[in-house]
Image (cartoon, rainbow, N blue to C red):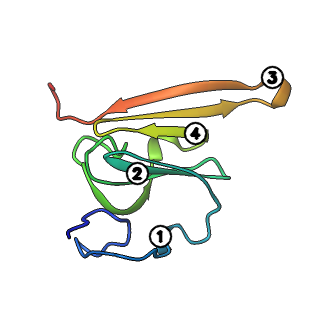
Amino acid sequence: MQTPHLSHGEGGESVPVPKLVEALAGNTVIGVTAGGHTAVWTDAGELFTFGGGGALGHGEDEYCASVPKLVEALAGKKVVGASTSMYYTAVWTEVGELRTRTLHLWVWKAGRAGE
C-alpha cells in the first residue's frame, strides 16, 4: 500500500509499524490533527504541517510535503490548537497571560489562484 505523506520522506513506501518522526526530534509536540494533511504544534507555539491535500500554509505552490515543515507565516505567534480537513486548516493562537488571554483564529484554504 502506498503512503505518500507519512512525514518520513520515504517517497511512498508503506510503514506498517510506528516510526519516530525524526524531523520533529528536539521539539516537544503537544498536539496533532490529521485530515487530508497533518498539522503538529509544539510547546514553543510553533506549527508544522506535512502530507498531501494542500492547505499546508507554505504558499500557493506547495500542496504536499513529505516531512514536517514550519509554517513561517505564523512565526512569532503562539499556536495552541489546530484542525485540518482535506482543503482547509484552522489554527488558534494565544496572546497575553492567563487573566488577559485572547485567542485568535487563523484559517486558510488549499487552491490555486482563482479557485
- Give the residue drawn at x 37%, y 31%: 108
Q: Residues within 10 Å of mark 3 (few under 14, many from 20)?
A: few
Local secondary structure at mark 4 = strand
Q: Residue furthest right?
A: 99
The disc, 2 or 1, on the residue closer to the chain's N-terminal end is 1
Q: Residues within 10 Å of mark 1 (few under 14, many from 20)?
A: few
Looking at the image, is mark 3 or mark 2 nearer the viewer?
A: 2
**115 to the left or right of 96:** left
Residue highlighted by disc 4: 81
Whole-Å distance between the Cαs marked 3 and 4?
18 Å
- Give the residue drawn at x 37%, y 72%: 8
Q: Is residue 87 above or below residue 43?
A: above
The disc, 1 or 4, on the residue closer to the chain's N-terminal end is 1
Depth order, front residue of 96/5:
5
Residue highlighted by disc 2: 38
Residue highlighted by disc 3: 100
Local secondary structure at mark 1 = helix
Local secondary structure at mark 3 = helix
